[in-house]
Structure formats: C-alpha cells, structure tokens
Amino acid sequence: MQPNQFKVDVASKLKIVSLVSVGKHPQSGRVRRSDQDSRAVELGLKLTGDNRSGESLTVLHAGDPREQSLRSYAGMGLKSVRVLQLDPSADAILPLGQHLLQCGADIVLTGVRAESGESSGMVPYQLAEKLGWPIVPRVANIVSVEGGVAEVLQALPRGQRRSVMVQLPFIASVDSAAPEARQSAFGPASRALMDIEVVSASVDMTRESWEEVPARKRPKRLKVVKAKTAAERFKAATAKSQGEGGKVMKNESAVEQAQAIFDLLKEEGVLR
Amino acid sequence: MSVEWLHPLLIATALALAVIGAVRRVNLWRAGKPDQINLIAGLMAMPGRYLHDLHDIVERGKYMSRTHAATGGGFVLSALLVILVHLLGIDSQILAWALLAALALMFVGALFVFKRRLNPPSRISKGPWMRLPKSLLAFAGAFFVLTLPAAGVLPEGSGGVLLTVVLTALIIWGMGELFFGMTWGGPMKHAFAGALHLAFHRRQERFGGGRSTGLKPVDLSLAQEIGGVLGVAKPTDFKWNQLLGFDACVQCGKCEAMCPAFAAGQPLNPKKLIQDMVVGLAGGTDANYAGSPYPGKAIGNAKGGPDHIITDGLIDPETLWSCTTCRACVEECPMMIEHVDAIVDMRRYLTMEKGKTPNKGAEVLDNIIATDNPNGYAPASRTNWAADQNLPLMRDVKEAEVLFWVSDGAFDMRSQRILRAFVKLLKAANVDFAVLGDEELDSGDVARRLGDDATFQSLAKRNLDVLSQYKFSKIVTTDPHAYHCLRNEYNDFGSDALNRVEVLHHTTFLNQLVQLGSLKLSPFTGAKVTYHDPCYLGRYNGEYEAPRELLRSMGIEIAEMERSGFRSRCCGGGGGAPITDIPGERRIADMRMEDASSTGAELVAVGCQQCTAMLEGVVEPRPQVKDIAEILVDQLVDSTADSSVGQLAREVH
Ligand code: SF4
Ligand code: SF4
C-alpha cells in the first residue's frame, strides 16, 4: 500500500485548517501561491478526501481578501477561502488563534516559513504557544489519524523520515518534501468565494519600526572536496551530516538536559 | 395487377421519413452553443463552396474526385428528377430521358466507388460504408429500369410480377440508404450534414482560398459565473456549427493517414476523434465504428451523450494531449472539419476547469504565469543572450523600421545561435531595427495550445500594451509560433498596436532583403540539402515559398521530402506535445528525420527553433540541422568596403 494512503476512523469527523500566506516567486518577485503553503493545502485536501468525505478542510488567510494569490490557492478546487480581514500592520497571531479555537480545528497546517513579509517561520510556533497545542515542524505527510492520535512523518535532511505520534489537536508546518501541490485552475480560482470576516487586532509595534530591504545572498563557504574516488564522493553526498562536538543525552534528568542546552546556547551566543 | 400507386407511395414515405430524420438531426446540432453565422448568405454560397473549396481538396486525388462528381452529381440530379417523374407523375419524355442520363451517370460513378471498395486502404472505414456502393447501384439501377417506360423505350406496364417485386425491393433498399439513411445516421449522412456544414462553417474565411488558423478566444467572463464552463466539457458546449461539422465526416481517413501522432503509435486518431464526437452529440457507444482505433486502445468501450462529460468515458484525455496541433488533418480533410479547434476546446476544459494538464504541463504554465517564460528564468535575464550584440532597445529609440521579436529562444543556448545569425544578417543589410528587450514576454503560444487561454490572453494583452508604445512598420521573428500568435491571434483583443504593421517570419523578410540585393551571398557548396516546413509557418501561415527561394538564392537545389509543403510532417514539437509527452511506440521527430535522411540529404534546413530542437534531438548518425538564417550567415559576403558596414561587422564579431 502507498504510504500516503490515508486512514482515519470515521466516528469523529476531522476538521483541518490550512493557513496560507502570500507567496513570492524567487525569480520574478511576483506574488503567487506560496510553495509550502500550497503543499499544506494539498495535504489538507488529501486528508479530507478533497473536502468531500465529511471531513472538512478550511483554507484560512489573515490579511487582505482582494489579494490575488489567494485565488491561486482556490484554483486547487476550493469552493471558498476564509479570510480574516486585517489591517496590514496588525499582528495576525491573536485573531488566527481565536478563529482556530472557535472553529474547533483538529489539525492546523502551515508552511515552514512565508515567502514574503517577515518570513521568520514563527507563526506556527506562536500559534502553538497561544493555543497550548503541540507543534510538529517540517512534516512530509500525515499517515493516519486513529483514536485522536495522528501518525505524522517528519522530513529530515537527505530524504530521511521520522515517524511521530501526536495527540489532536496539533499544529504542523509542512516541509518542501511534502507532496507537490496540484495544479491551480483558472475557472475554480475565479469562482471561489472569499468568505470574509473583519477582525481587529493590535498593531505589531515592533515591526512598525523596521525597514525592509531586499535580502542579499550570503557568500557560501567553498567546499573542499577531499574524496578521491567516485564511491567516496557518493558517500560524501549521501551520508548523514555528522554534527561534530555534539552529544546525545538520553539517560540524564530533564534538568541536566535543559542545562546542557542552555549552556550550549550561551556558548554559541544565542542567549546573552 | 396495377401497382401504379405503389412506387409514388414508397417515394413519398421515404421522403417524409427523411424529413423527420432531418428535423431530429438538426435538433441534435442545435443543442450546441449559439454562433454568429449569416444563415441565408451561407446557404446561398454553399453550392459554390461545394464546387470549388471542397472539390479543390478532393481534386488532390483524381480518382476520387471524378468518382464523387459522377456519383454525387448524378444522385442529386436523379433525386430531383425522380420526384418530378415518379412522385409528381409529370409526363414528359424530356424529363424521363434526363433522369435516365442522370441515373446512368450515377451508376457509372457507383461502379468506381464499388471498385475502390474491393481493396480499400486501411485509412477508410468499413462497416456500413462497404454497403454504400451496392446501395447506390441498387438505387440507380432500379430507377433506371423503372424510368424506361416513361421515356418511351418500353411500353407501359411491361415486365412481369417478378420484375416489379425485384424493382420494388431494390428501390426500398436504395431509398432506404439514400433518403432515409441520409438523415437517420447512415453513411449518406455526410451529404446532408456536409452541405449544411459548408453553408454554416465556423470559419467562413476559409472559403474562396482563404486561410483561417487562429484559435478563437475563450469568453473568460464565464469564469465568474457559477455553473459557467471554460472550454468544452460536454458535446453541447461546442458551438452548434462545430457539432454539425463533426456530422459531416465521411470517414475517408485522410486525416488519419497524415496524423503524426497516429503514425507514432500515440493514442490519437483524428478520424476516430471526430466519430467519437458524433457518438457524443447523438448519444451511444463507439461499438459500430468500423475504422482504425486509437493506437493501443480497443474499440467498444467509449460511451457518451450530449450532456455527458466527454473525458469521463468517451475520450481519454491522453488522446487530446497527443496532438501536436500540426493541422495536417485539417489541411487534408475534404469536409473541412476543424479537428484542432475541437481538441483545444476540450483541453481548455481540462486545464482551466479541472487543473489536469499532464506531465510538465502544470509546471510550465505556473512558470509562464510567474515569470512570462516557460522555464521560470528571471524575467530580467531575457536579454542576457545579447550582452555582446549591442542591440538597440525600443525603450530607448522608440521607433524603428523593424521590430525584431526575439521570442523565448532568448533563454535557450541552441536557439541563441539562430538569433545571433539573424542579428548579423540584419546588421549586414543595414536594417533599422530594435528589440523590446525585457519588455517582451512569452507570446502565449504554449499556454494557449495547452488550453490555458486565460494566461494566453493576459500575455497577449500585456504584449500589445508594450507594442502600442512604439512605432514600427514590421515585426519580424524567427519563431513561427510567435509569428502565428502575433499575426493571427492577437487581433481579437481590441488593440490597434498591430494595425498597419506587417508581421513577417524571418525567412520572408530575409528573402525580401536578398531579392532587393541588400545581402550578398556566396553560393553554397556543401552537400545535399532538404527543407523541413514548420507547421506554424506552412499550414498555419501559407509560407512555403520564401524559405525555398532563399535556399535557391544560394544555389541550393532542394532535395524535397515526400511529405513537404502543405503535406509536411510535423517535427513533434508543436501544441505543447513535448511538455505533455504522451508515450507512443516511436518518436515523431525520429520519423521526420527518417523522411529527411531518405532524400539522401546531409543537411536539413529549417525555419524554426522548435523544429531545430526536436530534429537535433534525434540520435546520430543523422543529417545536420540548421536554421536558414544560420546557413545564410555562413554564405554572407562582407565585401562592401563601406566603413559603416565594417564597423558593424566589428561589433558583431
Ligand atoms: S475528419 Fe475529414 S479527413 Fe478525417 S475521416 Fe472525416 S472527412 Fe475524412
Ligand atoms: S493536428 Fe496533427 S497531431 Fe493533431 S490530430 Fe491533426 S494531424 Fe494529428
């Protein structure tokens, strides 16, 4: 059986929400459906049998309902897109969280990070914190949901996968390794309903003071290839990256483990 | 025994049934969407169209054209005279003799039809069509004998009961096929539907030697309507005169014999496709179809009806995506049926409503939408190829004699060689030209052929907006696909940017330069050369001569391929076919290269970057492939001591 053949117990109908943002094409800078967010919609559609099997998928955006890129998500075959209409300067986290609670979401899917705006990748974490839900970062697939527990495949570097079990409700950010989004068709894109709810939220003061400039590519460190034979090069290209100087703490107490993390963050200058 | 009343009664019954059938058939067509056609003018023009336009095509095969003229002409005359003589009982020896002559003509014609059906080529349908010559002979023979008394050759009432019975049986058979069958779906349906199809053809411009090849735009406002459908989902979504056109098919299979996809073993057969459309418009299955199948697909499983989604059970989407839109079928069809329109109409539904463009289709469309080129390159890198060419930009000069439309070849290294060659020729001939640079966008050709008319229209409008800002009297392009869009498909968007602008393919333009003496060429001394006609230059735009004249101007004697000119075989690169990439048993490009090799040529001259790419994709050993611009540039004589030319030449090198 295909690994993405989805199993779900029919007694409780799943409610899935995919959060979508305004994407930006890397070459042209033009707005589009964001790659990861559209994979989140794709996964949502798959989990709900294209929104037909009684399970339901809501595609949710916080921002401007006239935004064109929302149409290209709708073109994936959505009847409507839910939009929480907000001032562009507002912080979307609070209204999003409230909405997710109200609508009784079981699984919330987001991209790992947005392609425009802050692009910090913090939205799923902040939502999880607000709601007190678990977050599973970088999922490649959701294999099954049974008895209120989902089996989720996380994407690790170099095509590896890790299976995790997680209690509903939860938030998952969808990795670029998840199945590719289906084609967006012009007809349904044009016909979809923008289901608008006007909400107000506090202005994101921190962001107000920021100035945006286009990112510059960071120079890349040249890689010295030491491999002599093709077999070695193949190994170098496919081997798991071995973190150096790390250590695995399995048997120590939680306090000790936390202390070790804290020390490391200090050492690296992340915490001051 | 007096049976004088019998035959008139039979004739009247057959005619009445024919009329009922006609009304039913007409209603099937009327289930389609409305189209603006002048009905009266069409009907008036119909006989002329039959005699000229249709017969011009049939005339390509002398045997069939004479046979058809005798049989068809004889039948029409006979039918009219039968009504006068036998139904209305007009007692006139002259009429009777005329009828005898018409029947004799028809009989002779039918004999030839019969002869041809003895050993029919695989392209023509069998089944009921095998019965047709016999029915024609029955009709003509029986009425001939029946008319002899009226002509005074035989006394009234001669012949016994047996003869009467035999004649009556033959008449019933003949009229059953020719009157009743004409409107109830027998082989003779082609005469009834065909005549009306000529009158109400969707592309009236095709008659009188005209050419009409641009696709019709989709009304995108349907996308705003709940329940609106873009493209064709069900047979009733076609225009009514398209449905009528399908019904006119005579199943001669000339389209099938020319179709490159069919020959390559891809699941497409244009004849079967049209017959499936007939199944769709009338309802039923394809079980009675008696021609070649779609390669690799069995007959008898297709089911359809006027309100059934076509791609749910009648036609496999793969069939639609196999087409290269080469128009060989349309060019060959004696009934002037428009296969490509129908195929693209159905693709439009699959792409714009279902989001089901196969293989790389979705990715290419996404790229075109996001970057205005099919590979998703940065729009700002469009002129990188010409970094060393010092090309005047329209943005700077605002005005030039010639606007050089570069096309997406700008992003492809092989095509860039063609572009460079052309620029060098332009400079050598001192042509006042400029390019749009990054302001040029993809022409929309691929998007349109893949069924995404929304994207095509967006590109067309944005391109027209840019064009309208500048002054030029000619657009010249090396890409026949862009050429076709600019020349034939950009006129539908209410822009005057191309009014009084001549759109030319580079071979046409270069030929003008050579004829004017602006380009000095040395004779070509290489090996044998053949020329491949690109579909979008030849069949779409009727340009067969300029490329040949150019080659001749270098002293090249073209070794023509068997299929050249309007019968040229596609390279396999059109219609987005390399993108949708439907598997077959062979590759179309390989077959075309075999055509070229069999002339003994060592060089294939082409006039299209897509053809170049497809033909060069064929494994070696094979003839070399070069665009005509590349061949010309090698023969260019930089003789003039003119200083400005010298300076240009330095810039180019
Ligand atoms: S579509 Fe035209 S060419 Fe093809 S079989 Fe029918 S009549 Fe002949
Ligand atoms: S356009 Fe060309 S490929 Fe398409 S059906 Fe006609 S002959 Fe075949």
Image (cartoon, helix red, strand yellow):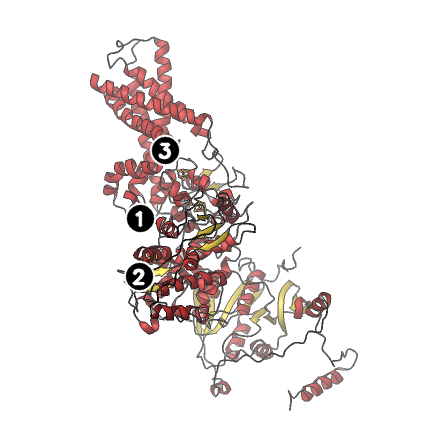
- Mark positioned earlier in the residue sequence (3 or 1): 1
Which residue shows up at 35% across the image and 53% down it?
B216
Say which element carries label 2: strand
Asked if labels 1 and 2 share a chain, the reply is: yes
Instruction: Report the disc number at residue B474.
Output: 2
Q: Amino acid at mark 2?
A: Lys
The quadrant the C terminus of chain A occupies is bottom right
Counting from the top left corner in percent of width and height, residue B542 is at 35, 49
Asked whether B625 or B148 is in front, the reply is B625
Q: Amino acid at mark 3?
A: Lys
Counting from the top left corner in percent of width and height, residue B399 is at 29, 69
Where does label 1 land, which residue? B35
Say which element carries label 1: loop
Q: Chain of mark 2?
A: B
Say which element carries label 3: helix
Which residue shows up at 28% across the image and 14% down it?
B148
Q: Toward which corner of the image does residue B607 lie, by quadrant?
A: bottom left
Alpha carbon separation for disc pair 1 and 2: 34 Å
Where does label 3 land, which residue? B189
